Amino acid sequence: MTGDRVFKALADPTRRFLLDLLFTRDGRTLTELESELEMSRFGVMKHLRVLEEANLVVTRRSGREKWHFLNPVPIREIHDRWIDKYTEHHTTALIELKAELEDES
Amino acid sequence: MTTATVTTTQVYRIYIKATPEAIWAAITQPEWTARYGYTGIASYDLRPGGAYSVAPTPEFKAAAEAQGFPCPDVIVDGEVIEAEPPRRLVTTFRMLMDPAMAEEGFTRITHEISPAPDGKSCSLTLTHELAGAPLLAALSRGDNEAEGAGGGHAWVLSDLKSLLETGAALGGD
């Protein structure tokens, strides 16, 4: 399931750091990303592949360069699937509480 | 794409369990576009140089005006650059809802639809080249969502997926 891959990809601090780098400035090459990490090129490539398989990073080729972009869609899907559901419930409960308390006064 | 503009480009990709034809229809036909995301009535003349525009639904116009935004009769305009149904659509895109965004001029949106290796779904990739349009870039990222301006492309695509896969958009239909 897609959600599993996203949660697994996000469960690693290096991969979250890579996403934060792309959030700050999107569209970067492997060389640029590598320069921000104390890690071998191969190690960074491995992390980027996990992010790509989870659809959190999308790459585009332009000439000899390969650009990495942050894809926020899977996080949005998790938000729509999980967060909305619970925050909505929370809000409804608070609104009910407010109505009840105001009724009493 | 050059290095100078690549950092202003936004890329969004979603996997949808639907045929390329169904996804193409959901992007280009007004009876579909009125049902998800910003719910605009899209109009495409699907040939190079053809006109592209989006009109608000009466509900959208009423909601925008209730929030104090005067809503023009055309909320997006642009031009079709490439149309290869059901795989690739390139248009220019200018947002007219907000005068400052309209001032930023035309940006460029590419939709690409490819069947996924699993044979059951397709990827839809939306690339928005936003050089010189920081306000539209923020809107597209969903930065203005708390003010009621919608969640940008990620929200629109998530809603489109929901509509195609379940027959209902996220906001209820």
Image (spheres, grey):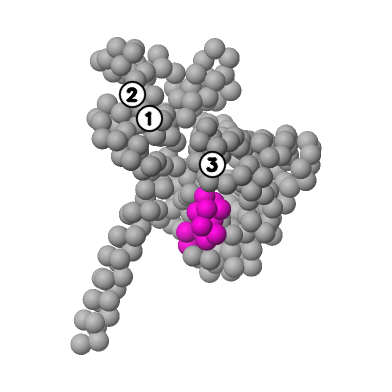
In the drawing, does residue B137 fall left or right of residue A51? right
Q: Using the image, tell me which numbered label, if any, was put on residue A47.
A: 2
- Say which residue appears at 54% left-offset and 35% top-offset: B116
Q: How many marks?
A: 3
In the drawing, does residue A63 fall left or right of residue A8? right
Instruction: Using the image, determine if residue B6 lies above or below residue B162.
Output: above
SS type, badge 1: helix
Q: Which amino acid is tagged 3?
A: Lys
Position of the N terminus of chain B, as image quadrant, is top right
In the drawing, does residue A18 fall left or right of residue B142? left
The range drawn in magenta is: B160-171
SS type, badge 3: loop
SS type, badge 2: helix
Residue B53 lies within the magenta run: no
Q: Using the image, tell me which numbered label, if any, was put on residue B92.
A: none
Between marks 1 and 3 in the image, the one whose residue lies nearer the viewer: 3
Residue that badge 1 annotates: A51
Q: Few, some or many C-alpha atoms within 10 Å of disc 3 (few <14, some 14-19, many ≥20)?
A: few
Q: Between marks 1 and 3, how big is the CA–CA gap? A: 22 Å
Q: In which quarter of the image is residue B63?
A: bottom right
Q: Between marks 2 and 1, how big is the CA–CA gap? A: 6 Å
Residue A46 or residue A99, whichever sits in front: A46
